[in-house]
Image (tube, rainbow, N blue to C red):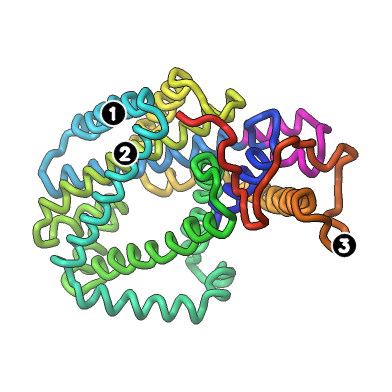
Amino acid sequence: MWYPPFALAFGLIVYTRGTDDYKFSSMLKVIFGEKDRKVYWIVDLAALIAIVGGVAAAIGFTGQVYASLMSNVFGLESSVYTYGLFVVVGLIFLGDVWLGLRKGIRNASRITIVLMILSFGLVLVVGPTLFILEIGLDAAGIWLSNMLRLSLYTAPTAAAANWPQGWTSFWWAWWAAWGLFVGSFVARVSKGRTIRETFVFLVVIPGFLLWVLHSIIGGWVLAPGYIGPVTEALSNGIPAAVAQAVAITPFGWLLGIMLVLVIAGFVLTSLDSAVYILSAITLGNDTPNARNRAWWGALLSFLGIMTLELPVFDAMQAFPTVLALPFTAFILLIAYASYITAREYYAENFGPMDGDPYVGLSDDEPSPSREDTTGEVDRPVAEEGTGGDD
């Protein structure tokens, strides 16, 4: 749910409403006007740091999983192979940078999605198929029945309550960091789509796919014959547990190769989209040049390689949590700014709505004048034709 607020805010405010600066702070100007420009600068800086922290931690974790796969599945112990993967991915990334948004990032994303579908399809077929299907349905029922309670679960009186703190809080901050750049990137590539379409493609469809994905992975490692060895390997960390599950699965060598390719695709597409937005924000332009994107890619890759040397996953979990958790309050402000912008758009194109449109906090004009605004009420995450395309 982190992606839609940022995607809608960016699309409505930056593209449809119009702004002079392609920055995160531009969304706050709807509420506060041009005051406190130092505060806006701090917001943009905090956003950049949060994005860098979240992406670097993701790259480092996937690198550790890759290292465990190479060691436990293929018997290749040397860390040279892990760093070699980053070198290869880095070279492919540079090629993607020069190819641009349409030819580079889009094609890399499509290939990665196909590889993921094939990988988890293989797990479903050769793994504990019946158990996966049963536990997926059972878990979905428990989740739907206890959704509100689980959403607020903190276990304050438990003797060893590390699950909510280590996972619920961690993922909250993780998606806060990723929501910043993924949401803004989605707005960049979704010109012409309606709010309803954006919600479906960012919430409904991904939610269903995540249920399928978690059902397959959860049923795979919890099935009889798998849970014992995987639990034992978990004492050496999550990457080791993943590698152990692959090693004891039929056709594990084939699954291992496919997962290595998926990891490479994940790192590549994460770098692609993250550096695109980081470059756009720093330059204030939604069509950043290749040189700036290459520099950001080098920085993120360097930080990702640094996290490979962190001794335990717990240390890596702190990376995005510390950097992104304070940014969660920002979502409330941009949600309100999106509401203001949507009402202004409706009033300009279809007449005023009943009641006060919003409670303004700025002495400035509520929205800039536009000579050329058209569309229907359900339109505009971002108007088609605004902004440049690669």
- Residues 316 and 343: in front is 343
Which of pointers 2 and 1 indicates the residue nearer the eye? 2
Q: Residue at x 34, y 78 (%)?
A: 137
Task: Say if mark 2 contacts mark 1, CB within 8 Å.
Answer: yes
Looking at the image, is 221 positioned above or below residue 104? Answer: below
Q: Earlier in the sequence, mark 3 or mark 1?
A: 1
Name the residue carrying label 1: 92
Q: Quadrant of residue 246?
A: bottom left
Q: Quadrant of residue 112?
A: top left
* Amino acid type, callout 2: Ala
Q: Which mark is residue 355?
A: 3
- In the image, the segment drawn in magenta is 25-46
Q: Where does the image place residue 42, in percent across and percent down from the top left?
A: 69, 32
Q: Quadrant of residue 385?
A: top right
- Is residue 288 toward the left or the right of residue 97 in the image? right
* Amino acid type, callout 3: Gly
Q: Where does the image place residue 59, in percent across and percent down from the top left?
A: 37, 39
Instruction: Sort mark 1 into few (<14), some (14-19) or many (20+) by Cα contacts within 10 Å.
Output: some
Name the residue carrying label 2: 108
